[in-house]
Image (cartoon, grey):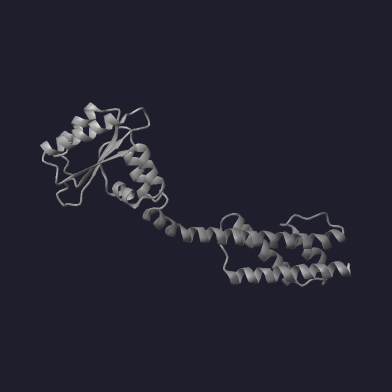
Amino acid sequence: MNDKKVRPLIDKLTKNYPTVIKSIWMTSSSESGEADTIIFLLDDTEQVDSITTNEIKLQAQKLAKSLKLRGKTDLIFYKLSDYWELIRHGSPVTFTEIRDGIPLYDPSGFFLPLKKLLLEGRVPGTKEAMRSLIQQSPLRLLRIERVHTVSIMDALSSAVVDAAQAPLMNVGVSPPTPKSVPDQLRIHFVRKRKLSPEYVKYYEDVIKTWKKLEHGELKILKPEKIDELVEKATRFVEKMEELMQKI
């Protein structure tokens, strides 16, 4: 940044009006780094009359002329309240001024945090914000897919547990925990040839998959895997209903 030519202008104005000038920055499009535009932000949240603001503008223009800046460098003055409205309403020119701006005077820390927020894509309506939204879209879709997967598996696991407990309780078994269900099914039904071992395996596949999701070992399931587990859970529940009828 080559701000040596504009430094006397900045120092003089900020010394004379330290409470009025909130921030000053410049933009430069040349390789030398010389200022194309110097932007002054005047704090009008306090009682600042138009005479004072006019004095600042007049003094800045005289200093710029004496330093031979006029004709090369534009001086732009904004009131803080007006500038904030431009930001709120998404002025492209304003965002460009902030994006390309190089701070020259910013004692209250207004400009640099605003520039940082803009570049991080946290100011709505900017191209940075749009880029950030696009980058986040795949992550949002993955989160939606995970929520959908967890919801389905939670329902499937509850269905097979409830279905298994019913016939077991009917033969005198205290309500078994989900973990103990397979052993109880084998003891009371598989060994007595009332239930094929494959149905116990269906139950275990559903519960094990659900536990892996619950513990974060799995993030999402492929659609074909979900279809397979839905089919297994459906067949298991239907078989438990048959057992209940036979009992």
Residue shown at 10% from the left, 41% from the top: 68
Along the viewing direction, whichever of 161 and 102 lies nearer the viewer? 102
Q: Is residue 187 above or below residue 72?
A: below
Q: Quadrant of the N terminus?
A: top left
Q: Position of residue 56 (x, y in %)?
A: 23, 32
Q: Is residue 45 above or below residue 129?
A: above
Residue at (82, 64) in percent of width and height: 188
Residue ID at (14%, 49%)? 32
Q: For residue 190, say whether it is visible.
A: no
Looking at the image, the residue that sits furthest to the front is 51
Q: Residue at x 33, y 49 (%)?
A: 95
Dividing the picture into quadrants, the one containing residue 187 is bottom right
Q: Quadrant of the C terminus?
A: bottom right
Q: Quadrant of residue 45?
A: top left
Q: Nearer the viewer, residue 179 or 122?
A: 122
Asked whether the viewer can see residue 47, the reply is: yes
Front residue (pair 170, 58)? 58
Question: Is residue 22 found left or right of 146 in the rendered image?
Answer: left
Left or right, 61 with reference to 148: left
* Residue 40 screen position, x and y as percent: 26, 38
Q: Quadrant of residue 53?
A: top left
- The tally of labels here is 0
Q: Position of residue 212 (x, y in %)?
A: 60, 59
Q: Position of residue 239 (x, y in %)?
A: 79, 70
Quick check: 209 above or below 14? below
